Amino acid sequence: MKKYASLITCLLTVAVMAGMLRCCTMVANPQISADDFRIYITPGETAAQIVDDIQSNEPEGTLTGLRWIMKLKKYDGHVRTGSYIIKKGAKPTSIYRMLASGSQTPVNVVINSCRTTDRMAGAIASQLMTDSLSVLQFLTDSASLSTLGYTAATVFELIIPNTYELYWNTSVESFMKRMSKEQASFWEKRADKAAAVGLTPHEIMTLASIVEEETAKADEMPVVAGLYMNRLHRGMLLQADPTVIFALGGERPKRVLYEHLNVDSPYNTYLYAGLPPAPIRFVSPTAIDAVLNYTRHNYLYMCAKEDFSGYHNFAATLSQHNANAARYQRALTQ
């Protein structure tokens, strides 16, 4: 009996050691054979769902070791949201430590210039762990905007379109604070040029928003900016159609008609002299720099080119402008 007991003990010891060796092998050996890939962990996800997500990028490999560690460590109780890069050759232990500690890899959030707050909200929400309604609520809530020094009128100045490196689970409030700091940094670098132009950053962004609405051609923007600077210097009405469209609100009309020019709004530059109260859209750095480096010329009028290229004919006199407008109208009629 003693011999049998010793034999059984030896066999059990070997079995336990073999099991331990197998476990050690599972958690120590590289498990990821696929090239680097990114996963996104949202609120409420379980360990099983996260491993399944990783598995979908690693169909040929086994993640038994990772499942075992997560169960042993009770990972379900402290899942951390975010975006994580799973690297080729990563071990189950290193994957677990990264996920459990919340060691995210930032994402590049690309923000383009756009006309409205709802479009901006949608663009931001599509790239972060948030929803467009939450972003839109911040952008349209006076109390939220006031915490950063903005109002419903100046909200278009809050976000400078660019590419920003952020954590995917950044909150809406943290995102907006970051944008406010980026805006301050943007203007700190351009303070001397703004002073040379003789306009405040607020006025420059307001004029840039008109310029960007007038032309989508980056090489033409400084010329358009110079035209409006000429009008400002001469005390002329800007007579910018985009400001009328903004004043009308709602859907943009296909063409600005004479009846539209009488809308009583401080944004209507056909009725009120000088710049409108605030920008009429989110403004790109390209348009802002076009105002800061506007072209010096004697143009006072502009009209779309008759070739429908998106460019404009410019004129220094009303008679020249009327001739340009007549050519465009003939082409439009044809």
Image (cartoon, helix red, strand yellow):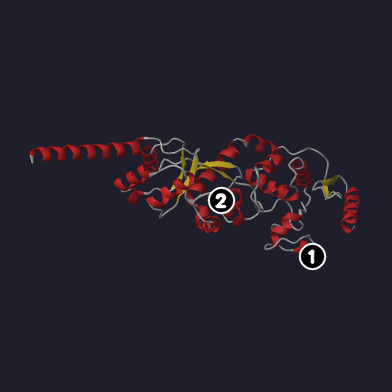
Does 14 sit left or right of 263 as displayed? left
Secondary element under disc 1, as helix, strand or loop, is helix
The residue sitting at 33% across, 45% down in the picture is 68
Does 96 sit left or right of 134 as displayed? left
Q: Residues within 10 Å of mark 1 (few under 14, many from 20)?
A: few
Checking the image for residue 288, the label placed there is: none
Secondary element under disc 2, as helix, strand or loop, is helix
Which quarter of the rendered picture does the N terminus lie within? top left
How many numbered marks, from 0 up? Answer: 2
- Percent x, y for residue 283? 65, 47
Indicate the quadrant where residue 13 lies.
top left
Determine if residue 265 is in view.
no
Residue corresponding to mark 1:
259
- Percent x, y for residue 169? 46, 48
Residue lying at the far left in this picture: please name it.
Answer: 1
Residue corresponding to mark 2:
124
The residue sitting at 34% across, 48% down in the picture is 75
The type of residue carrying mark 1 is Glu
Position of 23 relative to 125 (above/below): above
Position of 149 relative to 249 (above/below): above
Q: Nearer the viewer, mark 2 or mark 1?
A: 2
Q: Nearer the viewer, residue 272 or 306?
A: 306
